């Protein structure tokens, strides 16, 4: 034990020395465009609260009513005695929203991604995965016995090469797996080109749309809608922990057979507790609002465009794109320090943004990630840009 403690202390010290130690900042009230912290009030530009529903009164009220009606917990996994009528209702509503026959809930999207590959694919199959995919996809793929192939981020030539290799090695079923949105860049996976390759090689396509469900695409159905390929994507995973209320929970939406098999075999589904009743009710309300949130989506698009325009006018280097994640780049050797100092100074100025550097992003490509929300006003956006300009001086 003493030697373990010593070695842990050394690891923690190394993290601190390398500037990788993550401190948690405590928020004293609701999530929203502004948050109260111990050091004061700050405009919040780092939540995944794209539609502003995390602190929404209607969602909170729906959850509160469910607390009265359904109680606090279920003390069971789904298949023993943890399924209420509302769990199945939410599954059908999610499936309907993303345009699939059915869906299945998990405690988180991390669990959905952790459970799906082992349940669906065997050593005879192949999984072809984008290099920048989320950690939960990487871990889930590791848990399956399928052959693994990795392609360079959004690189369709490399995807073709890997698909050819999987086919040459005699894979039975092949699945292409990608994030819909790459969260460090705010870039989209080229789903139209991916679906073309899938057709050519007769593979399945799976998209983790966690940073898109509810607000990307003309009616918020996500990246498949944005690229016009909703009927060509076979499996969609997503989270209830971002735009759709931001509480917790994940899902897989797919064909009836796939969903049925996951109910039988996905280990995080079989061996982990059901989603809490109030979370189900709040998420249903969030989804109901999201369906109808054209005005919020338009406002989010407008605020994103405004932010990008003002930042470019002020001479900042913002990665191109149209997603409400904006990567403000600080390139080169001193970039990591510069990004960290600017983010710290901005917090003193009352604007909360997060700096990312190696190993979260490649060396030399440090950045401050700014995430917009439909709850931000034009004044909020202008205040954020002003803080960037002041902090740079
Ligand atoms: C946030 C995120 C997850 C994890 O979702 P949780 O429901 O919080 O576990 C999984 N995949 C992607 C792409 C994400 O962005």
Image: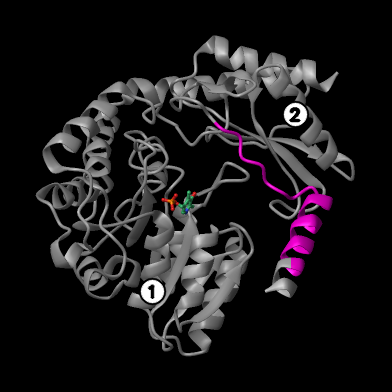
Q: Residue at x 73, y 55 (%)?
A: 359
| Picture quadrant of residue 356 | top right
Residue contact at pointers 1 and 2, CB within 8 angstroms: no
Task: In this rendered view, identify the residue nearer to me: 239 or 59.
Answer: 59
Q: Name the residue under label 2.
A: 344
Q: Residue at x 17, y 67 (%)?
A: 79
Does 263 sit left or right of 127 as displayed?
left
Q: Can residue 312 be seen in this view?
A: no
Give the residues drawn in magenta, as a range: 6-26
Q: How far apart are marks 1 and 2 (CA)?
A: 49 Å
Which image quarter holds the N terminus?
A: bottom right
Instruction: Assess disc 1: are there few (<14), some (14-19) or many (≥20) residues with their C-alpha within 10 Å of its C-alpha.
Output: some
- Above or below, 330 relative to 124: above
Task: In this rendered view, identify the residue nearer to me: 118 or 156.
Answer: 118
Q: Is label 1 in a helix, a strand or a loop?
A: loop
Does 60 sit left or right of 354 as displayed?
left
Q: Is label 2 in a helix, a strand or a loop?
A: helix
Q: Which of the numbered marks, if any, corresponds to residue 202? A: 1
Q: Position of residue 307 (x, y in %)?
A: 61, 21
Which image quarter holds the C terminus?
A: top right
Does 8 sit left or right of 219 as displayed?
right
Q: Where is residue 326 in the image (x, y as percent from the top left)?
A: 61, 34
Q: Colour scheme of this structure image?
A: one colour
Q: Position of residue 367 (x, y in %)?
A: 73, 39
Q: Which of the numbered marks, if any, corresponds to residue 187? A: none
Q: Is residue 109 magenta?
A: no
Q: Does the magenta stretch include residue 14?
A: yes
Outermost residue on the right side: it is 333
Q: Where is residue 106 in the image (x, y as percent from the top left)?
A: 31, 58
Label 1, ligand 1: CB separation under 8 Å: no
Q: Which residue is drawn at 33% across and 76% down?
A: 119
């Amino acid at each position: 034990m003493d030697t373990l403690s010593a070695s842990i202390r050394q690891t923690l010290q190394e993290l601190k020395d390398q500037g990788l130690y993550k401190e948690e900042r405590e928020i004293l009230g609701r999530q929203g465009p502004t948050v109260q912290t111990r050091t004061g009030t700050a405009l919040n530009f780092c939540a995944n609260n794209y539609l502003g529903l995390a602190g929404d009164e209607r969602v909170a009220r729906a959850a509160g009513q469910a607390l009265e009606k359904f109680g606090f917990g279920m003390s069971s996994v789904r298949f023993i005695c943890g399924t209420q009528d509302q769990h199945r209702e939410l599954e059908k509503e999610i499936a309907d929203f993303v345009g699939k026959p059915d869906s299945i809930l998990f405690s988180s999207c991390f669990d959905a991604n952790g459970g799906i590959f082992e349940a669906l694919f065997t050593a005879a199959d192949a999984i072809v995965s984008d290099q920048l995919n989320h950690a939960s996809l990487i871990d889930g793929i590791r848990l399956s016995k399928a052959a693994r192939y990795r392609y360079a981020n959004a690189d369709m030539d490399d995807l073709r090469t890997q698909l050819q290799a999987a086919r040459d090695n005699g894979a039975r079923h092949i699945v292409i797996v990608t994030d819909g949105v790459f969260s460090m860049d705010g870039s989209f996976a080229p789903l139209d080109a991916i679906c073309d390759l899938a057709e050519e090689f007769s593979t399945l396509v799976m998209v983790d749309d966690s940073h898109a469900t509810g607000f990307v695409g003309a009616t918020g159905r996500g990246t498949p809608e944005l690229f016009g390929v909703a009927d060509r994507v076979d499996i969609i995973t997503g989270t209830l922990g971002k735009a759709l209320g931001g509480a917790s929970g994940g899902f897989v939406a797919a064909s009836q057979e796939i969903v049925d098999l996951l109910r039988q075999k996905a280990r995080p589904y079989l061996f982990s507790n059901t989603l809490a009743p109030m979370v189900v009710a709040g998420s249903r309300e969030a989804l109901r609002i999201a369906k109808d949130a054209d005005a919020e989506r338009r406002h989010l698009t407008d605020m994103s465009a405004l932010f990008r325009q003002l930042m470019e006018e002020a001479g900042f280097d913002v990665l191109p794109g149209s997603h409400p994640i904006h990567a403000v780049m600080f390139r080169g050797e001193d970039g990591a320090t510069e990004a960290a100092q600017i983010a710290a100074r901005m917090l003193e100025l009352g604007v909360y943004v997060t700096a990312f550097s190696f190993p979260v992003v490649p060396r030399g490509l440090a950045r401050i990630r700014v995430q917009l929300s439909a709850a931000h006003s034009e004044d909020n956006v202008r205040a954020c840009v002003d803080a960037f300009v002041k902090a740079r001086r």
